[in-house]
Every structure is written in C-alpha cells, then in structure tokens.
Image (spheres, helix red, strand yellow):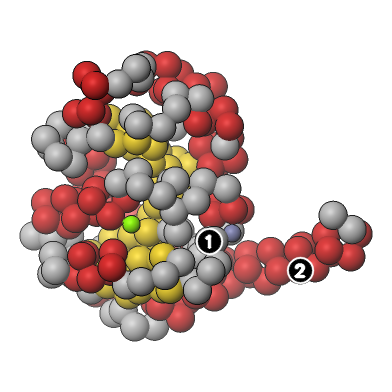
Amino acid sequence: MTAERVEVKQKVLSANDRLAAEIRADLTSRGVLCLNLISSPGSGKTTLLEKTIDELKSKLRLAVVAGDVQTRNDAERLERHGVPVEAIETGGGCHLNAEQVSKSLSGLGLSELDLLFVENVGNLVCPSSFDLGESMKVVLMSVTEGEDKPLKYPAAFRRAGALVLTKIDLIPHLQFSAERAVENARSINPELEVFATSSFTGEGLAEWLDWLLEAAERKRSG
Ligand code: MG
Ligand code: ZN
C-alpha cells in the first residue's frame, strides 16, 4: 500500500471510530447491550438469531440490525419472529461501518430496548476492524469450517468477547475436533467465552441464552 493510501485508510477508520464512540455512549446511557455478530458466510448467524429471539423476546426487548451485501432476505426472516429489524444492504461493501449502523438506529426506538444484535456481513476479515459502537463482538464459527480458522483469521477472534461454535449436531459426520478448535481460539484470545451450540437440536443454547440475559441485566443496571 502507498503512504497516501495508508493515510486515507487511517482517516476513514478514525472517522468511523469517532462515530462508533458516539453510538456506544448513546447505547450505554440507555442501558442497551449491543452485540456485533461476525463470521464467515453460512456459519449460522441468522439461524442463531431466530432461535435466540424466540427464546428471549418474552424476557428482553430485542431488535436487530441485519447487514448483507445484497437482499433483505435475512432481515425478512428475522422480522417474522416479531421484533424490530433494520436491514442494511451494503451493495458490494464487505463489512458494516458505524455510519450505516447510526442511520439504522434512528429507525429503532432505542429507549425501548434491552438487547440489540448487529448481524454483520458474512466475512471474517474486515468486519473485525470496524468498530460499530457495540458492547462486544461475538464471533461465530461452524463445525464445517476448519479447526484452524482462529489461527487463519486471528483478528476476529482476538477482538471478540465470545465465540459461538455452531452446527455441533453435524460433528458425528465430520472430522472436526471441537476441543482443538476451542484450543486454537483460546490460543489467540484466552479470555473468550465459548458456547457450543446447535440451532437445529437446541443443544448448548441454554448456556448462550443465560449468558445473554445476565449480560443484558448487567448493562441495564449500569
Ligand atoms: Mg445471515
Ligand atoms: Zn470490508
């Protein structure tokens, strides 16, 4: 990269960071927990959100900002579960930025929320560099991906507070060691909370849901 391009990139990132800090301050003052979900395409972000919404919507006030390169398909799937959803179509953009999220938030009644999910564009690379004002990044990884994914894409795992391993019902059909995958992830980030889940069988979801309830409660009580 040329010096000029590096400079432009730094300016874009710092403008993004300033807006993200405003979003974070606003959400924090309202006691809203915001989780930024990051993963490769097809790892099960939308499906996990559908299950999570069904289980938690009687206990918490939820909303979703759903990003995709193209289509509102995920947003429409999520809307059917009866919570407010704002879609962001990036039109080719491979990550969400704070400006897009800020615009979407104006369509949601933030004071009436406990937990806001941001479903990032499916991509393990640049979404991890863009602060969206979230309370925490959550990285998802399905068991159909390689156990070494955390080693190949360390930034996403380093910057996340939690890892959700998805589709664990498929493990019997695969050469996949969940232990090794978690070991790899913790070698990058020893602090990671880890959840092993199947949205299909429901296995492991209780731990994930309890953790969300506790985190939302902590956020609400400041
Ligand atoms: Mg999705
Ligand atoms: Zn990108």
Which quadrant is home to the C terminus? bottom left
Query: What's the distance in space between the residues labelled 2 and 1, CA to CA?
Result: 17 Å
Q: Is mark 1 on a helix, strand or loop?
A: loop
Q: Quadrant of residue 83?
A: bottom left
Residue at 29% across, 79% down? 109
- Residue, far front: 173
* Label located before the other in sequence (2 or 1): 2
* Residue matched to label 2: 11
Does residue 71 appear left or right of residue 204 in this picture?
right
The vertical placement of 56 against 166, above or below, is below
Circle nearer the viewer, 2 or 1: 1
Label 1, residues with CA under 10 Å away: few <14, some 14-19, many ≥20: many
Does residue 9 appear left or right of residue 61 in this picture?
right
Does residue 186 appear left or right of residue 119 in this picture?
right
Does residue 204 appear left or right of residue 176 in this picture?
left
| Residue 75 in the image, given as x and y percentages of width and height | 28, 69
Residue at 24% across, 21% down? 173
Q: In which quarter of the image is residue 168?
A: top left
Q: In which quarter of the image is residue 139?
A: top left
Q: Which amino acid type is shown beneath numbered disc 2?
A: Lys
In front of the other: 149 or 63:
149
Q: Is mark 2 on a helix, strand or loop?
A: helix
Residue at 13% across, 60% down? 57
Mark 1 and ligand 2: say if the CB distance to the nearest ligand atom is below 8 Å.
yes
Q: Which amino acid type is shown beneath numbered disc 1?
A: His
In front of the other: 128 or 77:
77
Label ID, residue 216: none
The quarter of the image that holds ligand 1 is: bottom left
Which quadrant is home to the N terminus? bottom right
* Residue matched to label 1: 95
| Residue 171 in the image, given as x and y percentages of width and height | 25, 23
- Residue, far left: 58
